[in-house]
Image (cartoon, rainbow, N blue to C red):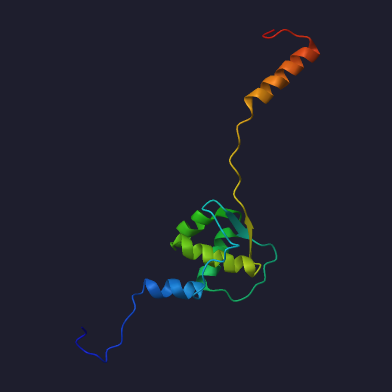
Amino acid sequence: MRENPDQALELTSDLVPLFVITNGRGLPPEHEYSHTTLVTAQEGAPARALSPEAREVMDLVSDGFLSVAEVAGHTHLPLGIVRILLARMEDDGLIFVRPPTPRAELPDRELLQAVIDGLHASLKTPYGA
């Protein structure tokens, strides 16, 4: 129990800023950013008053693409908070989001062998020559 019942409860500084940064907003389902999703500043993004966190993100991504994880690392904000902030910024037309580059798939070995066999047959060269 508290010694003084009239004393207001004090929220820790760790909780309040994160809630304020996101305006209590959650991540919309259409904005599923992975760690490797790339973001950059939109050309001709409207110059207007931004929150300090959004301004920091804009400064970071104005020179080129950064991954969501890199933005979180540079801003020292949790990844979830950065995702929500980026979703709001994308909705406002401030940033351009590019999905991560998919991993390269290994070519089908049988297909490659068929191509090699076809080339050898059309050129009438023996294997290994």
- From the viewer's perspective, is residue 87 above or below residue 48? above
For the residue pair 25 and 52, the one nearer the viewer reads as 25
Q: Is residue 56 left or right of residue 40?
A: left
Q: Position of residue 99 (x, y in %)?
A: 61, 52
Q: Residue at x 59, y 49 (%)?
A: 100
For the residue pair 93 and 57, the one nearer the viewer reads as 93
Q: Quadrant of residue 93?
A: bottom right
Q: Position of residue 27 (x, y in %)?
A: 53, 66
Q: Quadrant of the C terminus?
A: top right
Q: Is residue 103 left or right of residue 20?
A: right
Q: Quadrant of the N terminus?
A: bottom left
For the residue pair 51 and 59, the one nearer the viewer reads as 51
Q: Residue at x 57, y 74 (%)?
A: 50
For the residue pair 54 and 85, the one nearer the viewer reads as 85
- Residue at the bottom extreme? 6
Q: Residue at x 65, y 23 (%)?
A: 110
Q: Position of residue 117 (x, y in %)?
A: 72, 16
- Residue at the front extreme? 110
